[in-house]
Amino acid sequence: MRGLKTILFLTISNTFMTFAWYGHLKFKEYDWGKNLGLISVILISWGLAFFEYLFQVPANRAGFKADGGPFTLVQLKTIQEAITLTMFMVFTIVFFKTEKLGWNHLVGFALIVLAVFVIFKKW
């Protein structure tokens, strides 16, 4: 159950982080965001990152083996990176329709998924 909670919380966390890192690139398309200065955009992104941390810290605590969770530190980081790229791909497709994901992006993502397999495999 802790493993599922970890993955769910990391997914929510990465959703907030993706919006904090890249969502501001769409602000200028809205009336309220056309004249925002850099400091305003940074503060909005920090606000979103706050919510990212509300999920990321508990996710890692619940998932970390030394705290009773099922994952090693390396496994946690690998899961987080795979979720980050998944969320980024979804975000790109949904919010940046002019960006195209090519075959090389998909192959790269598949290699990262393969990395998850390699990290988790008991050799």
Image: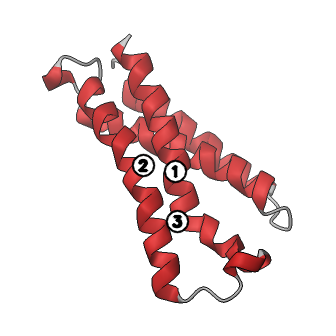
Q: Is residue 3 left or right of residue 29?
A: left
Number of other residues with Cα within 10 Å of mark 1, as a class: few under 14, some 14 to 19, many 20 or more:
many
Q: Which residue is mark 1?
A: 16
Image point 34% across, 16% down: which residue? 2
Q: Amino acid at mark 3?
A: Trp
SS class, disc 1: helix
SS class, disc 3: helix
- In x, y percent, where is residue 89? 68, 50
Name, please, the residue furthest toward the top: 1
Q: Which residue is mark 3?
A: 21
Q: Are marks 2 and 1 in contact (CB under 8 Å)?
A: yes
Q: Which of disc 1 and disc 2 is earlier in sequence?
A: 1
Q: Which residue is mark 2?
A: 52
Q: Amino acid at mark 2?
A: Glu
Q: Which of disc 1 and disc 3 is earlier in sequence?
A: 1
Query: Is there any visible trace of residue 93 in the rendered image?
Result: yes
